[in-house]
Amino acid sequence: MGSAGGALPVLMSVSIPVPVVLFLVLLAPAVGSFLAVLVDRLPRGEDVLRRRSHCRSCGRTLRALDLLPILSFLGSAGRCRHCQAKIPPWTLYLEIAATGAMVLALAAGGGLEQVLFSALFLWLLLALGVCDLLWFRLPDVLTAVLFALVMCAALGGRPGGGLGAEIGDLTSALLGAGAGAVAGTGSFLLLRLGYRALRGREGLGLGDVKLMAGLGAYAGVFDLPLLVLLAALIGLTGGLLPLMRPLLRPLLRSPDKRGGYQQMGRPLGQQALPFGAALCAAAALLWLLRALGLLPG
């Protein structure tokens, strides 16, 4: 998914027509808007396709002009035009971040297939990471799609973790992805079971175990320790909590909903840290290192 040999700022090396590049960049904010729908509805168990977009406060159905990515939020000053309720700003951040992810995917170079795989990978990491930050949940459908995406890349001959360095090296790519998925899922499952046996309570969510199927397949066996190390550094320092505090504040107000914002006043030792978000951030950093040519893959 990352370009194995090219440096990041190499837009000139993208073998895609300029009109297609412009279309992809313009499409990205709309994808970010859809990611916000997924983050908002999947943990609630709501339909993400058939139910029309509406205001959470007054229930009014939103018009097309209310759904323009980035522009609608800025034009309405982040408020519903019907009831003036505040719109969670993380929806805007997701739209901007999704656009940035597409720009990075294009900057990494390669053909259309490679750019789309990279963009989809980064978009899924965004959705999963924000979902874990806000809800402490990693929806099964998103972790399954992530795993399927990485395995499809392996079927196309893309290496899972350095075992195959050339496009079309199908056997090595599948071995790398498969071994990484087994190693990632297996190690995290053992950690989950071991912690519960030693402490008598859950210390690692099952969603994190499922997430490691896709992330392990992407990292491969050789880069899996680096992925976990990066995630541990991000998670254990609590770096995500203060950085993402503005995102957490507006979303969850109901006392029966469990989310990061409700835990911000607790001592760090009593907080359930969103380690899935740290894993997603580490995977994005791993993608960037590969795109820069600093790591094989």
Image (tube, grey):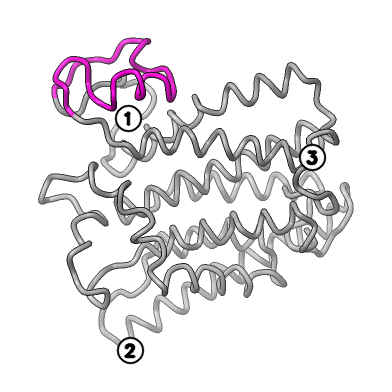
Residue shown at 84%/57% (left/top)? Answer: 171
Q: Amino acid at mark 3?
A: Gly
CA gap between label 1 and label 3 equals 36 Å
Give the labeled residue for mark 1. 47
Q: Position of residue 182 (x, y in %)?
A: 61, 67
- Which secondary structure class fits the magenta region best? loop
Question: Mark 2: which secondary structure?
Answer: helix
Horizontal and vertical percent position of residue 251: 24, 42
Q: Quadrant of residue 114?
A: top right
Q: Mark 2 or mark 1: which comes first in sequence?
A: 1
Q: Nearer the viewer, residue 144 or 265?
A: 265
Residue wearing tag 3:
109
| Magenta region, residue range | 58-85
Give, as a three-letter code, the residue at label 2: Leu
Q: Is residue 71 magenta?
A: yes
In the image, residue 3 above or below residue 71: below
Q: Which residue in the structure is indicated by mark 2?
A: 198
Mark 3, secondary structure of its residue? loop
Which element is circle 1 on?
A: loop
Q: Amino acid at mark 1?
A: Asp
Q: Residue at x 42, y 49 (%)?
A: 140
Question: Residue 48: x and y, percent?
Answer: 36, 29
Q: CA distance from mark 2 to mark 1?
A: 39 Å
Q: Nearer the viewer, mark 1 or mark 3?
A: 3
> Is the residue marked by circle 3 packed among few (<14), some (14-19), or many (20+) residues within 10 Å?
many
* As drawn, 5 above or below 82: below
- Contact between marks 2 and 1 (CB within 8 A): the answer is no
Which callout, 2 or 3, points at the residue further toward the start of the chain? Answer: 3
Q: Position of residue 192 (x, y in %)?
A: 40, 75
